[in-house]
């Protein structure tokens, strides 16, 4: 209708009234046209009954106004009424971010939150406040408006930050010897003597503690893809956290030595250095790797196998490496064959090779470490 501007009307009843006036119709005439009772027409005109899709189509046929226009006005009107009736809950947006961004069910399952059921919303929120050491739900660090307390190098996801908090929670309760750079350097030398045998790795937690390093193993959370982290509780309290998500001897020693180099270089003193997906290109020394990571990667690679020996071995044997060659070279280098296999895989990019040498090692280390996960919960005070 030429004199009707749909945008001028806020309710279906207003639009119907205007259309009736434009045509000079009464409610009774419209009732006859639509084939419904006059009282029903009055309810639509007075907005005491909402339009259905079927009724919108009847009105379209009667007035020549699109049923979509009628339904859009009805939806907008319903939403406006709901906003008036609804009680604003400032916690709702925070709850959406917390429950949507964190694996709350997994945190409950892992014993990080002392709640029996994720549907106990108030209890979950209280536990999250304690876990993140916040003063209230709105101050939990992962919320967009909350002030950041944990400085982390680069981007970090909510899930990764939750894992980091668990490492810090456990590390804060550990008692270790006095830290000194000299003690850490001596520790690295002692660790190098453990590379020949898988079983020797059981000594790692003790040696790190004697050097003043808090060593924590926390199973990774789903989708976190974390390998390790280095941060400091204070100027003399370095922490190394690992997930051991790749239960392989080569990955363990590479990641551990990588994080140790961060400690030696005092990386993570101001901002935690969280290493995720530390394999492939991220384990290299190319220009696409940051300076700090390049230094740590180089130290880790040199530690696992002497670089000159490794380079010469690959030059002699590439592209064919026999089992006998790997075992013999590992004996010369005084390391487990899995470390040689790991370096060859990285150098050649062929990660399907020599999997038989990449023995599992987590079960050797976790019994002697501050470990959390895989069915066990490390006890911490609230």
Image: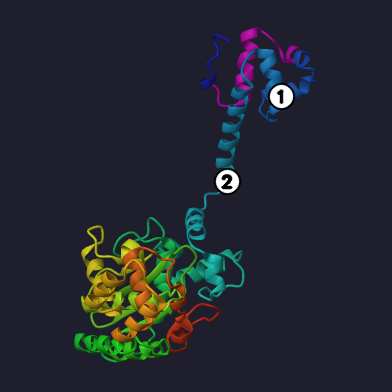
Give the vertical position of 304 relative to 139 (above or below): below
Q: Is residue 336 magenta?
A: no
Seen from the viewer's position, the closer of residues 26 and 264 is: 264
Image coordinates of residue 191 in percent, x first then y, are 30, 87
Taking 205 as reference, is 212 left or right? left
- Residue 142: in sight, yes or no? yes
Residue found at x 38% / y 82%:
327
Taking 266 as reference, is 257 left or right? right
* Of callouts 1 and 2, the N-terminal one: 1
Distance from disc 1 to disc 2, alpha carbons, whole Å, reads 27 Å
- Residue 268: in sight, yes or no? no
Seen from the viewer's position, the closer of residues 235 and 182 is: 182
Residue found at x 55% / y 13%:
4
Q: SS for tag 2?
A: loop
Seen from the viewer's position, the closer of residues 31 and 183 is: 183
Q: Report the magenta residues as a range.
A: 9-30
Residue 86: image tag:
2
Number of other residues with Cα within 10 Å of mark 1, as a class: few under 14, some 14 to 19, many 20 or more: some
Residue found at x 46% / y 84%:
366
Taking 59 as reference, is 263 left or right? left
Residue 55: image tag:
1
Image coordinates of residue 351 in percent, x first then y, are 41, 66
Residue 363: image tag:
none
């Amino acid at each position: 209708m030429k004199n009707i501007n749909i945008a001028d009307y806020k309710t279906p009843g207003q639009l119907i009234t205007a259309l009736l006036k434009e045509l000079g119709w009464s409610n009774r005439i419209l009732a006859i046209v639509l084939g419904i009772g006059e009282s029903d027409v009055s309810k639509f005109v007075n907005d005491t009954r909402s339009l259905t899709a079927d009724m919108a189509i009847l009105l379209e046929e009667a007035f020549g106004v699109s049923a979509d226009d009628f339904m859009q006005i009805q939806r907008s009107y319903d939403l406006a009424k709901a906003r008036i009736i609804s009680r604003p809950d400032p916690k709702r947006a925070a709850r959406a971010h917390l429950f949507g961004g964190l694996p709350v069910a997994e945190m409950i399952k892992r014993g990080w939150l002392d709640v029996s059921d994720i549907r106990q919303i108030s209890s979950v929120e209280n536990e999250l406040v304690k876990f993140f050491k916040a003063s209230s739900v709105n101050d939990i660090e992962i919320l967009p408006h909350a002030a950041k307390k944990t400085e982390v190098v680069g981007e970090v996801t909510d899930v990764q930050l939750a894992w980091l908090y668990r490492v810090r929670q456990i590390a804060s309760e550990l008692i270790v010897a006095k830290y000194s750079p000299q003690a850490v350097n001596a520790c690295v030398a002692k660790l190098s003597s453990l590379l020949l045998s898988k079983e020797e790795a059981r000594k790692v937690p003790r040696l790190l503690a004697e050097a003043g390093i808090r060593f924590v193993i926390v199973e990774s959370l789903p989708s976190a893809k974390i390998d390790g982290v280095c941060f400091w509780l204070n100027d003399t309290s370095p922490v190394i956290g690992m997930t051991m998500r790749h239960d392989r001897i080569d990955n363990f020693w590479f990641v551990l030595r990588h994080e140790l180099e961060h400690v030696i270089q005092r990386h993570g003193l101001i901002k935690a250095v969280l290493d995720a997906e530390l394999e492939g290109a991220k384990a290299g020394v190319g220009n696409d790797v940051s300076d700090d990571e390049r230094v740590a990667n180089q130290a880790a690679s040199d530690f696992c196998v002497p670089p000159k020996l490794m380079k010469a071995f690959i030059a002699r044997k590439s592209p064919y490496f026999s089992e006998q060659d790997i075992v013999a070279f590992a004996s010369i280098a005084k390391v487990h064959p899995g470390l040689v296999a790991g370096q060859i895989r990285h150098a050649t990019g062929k990660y399907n090779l020599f999997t038989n040498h990449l023995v599992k090692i987590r079960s050797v280390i976790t019994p002697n470490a501050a470990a959390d996960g895989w069915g066990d919960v490390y006890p911490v005070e609230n």
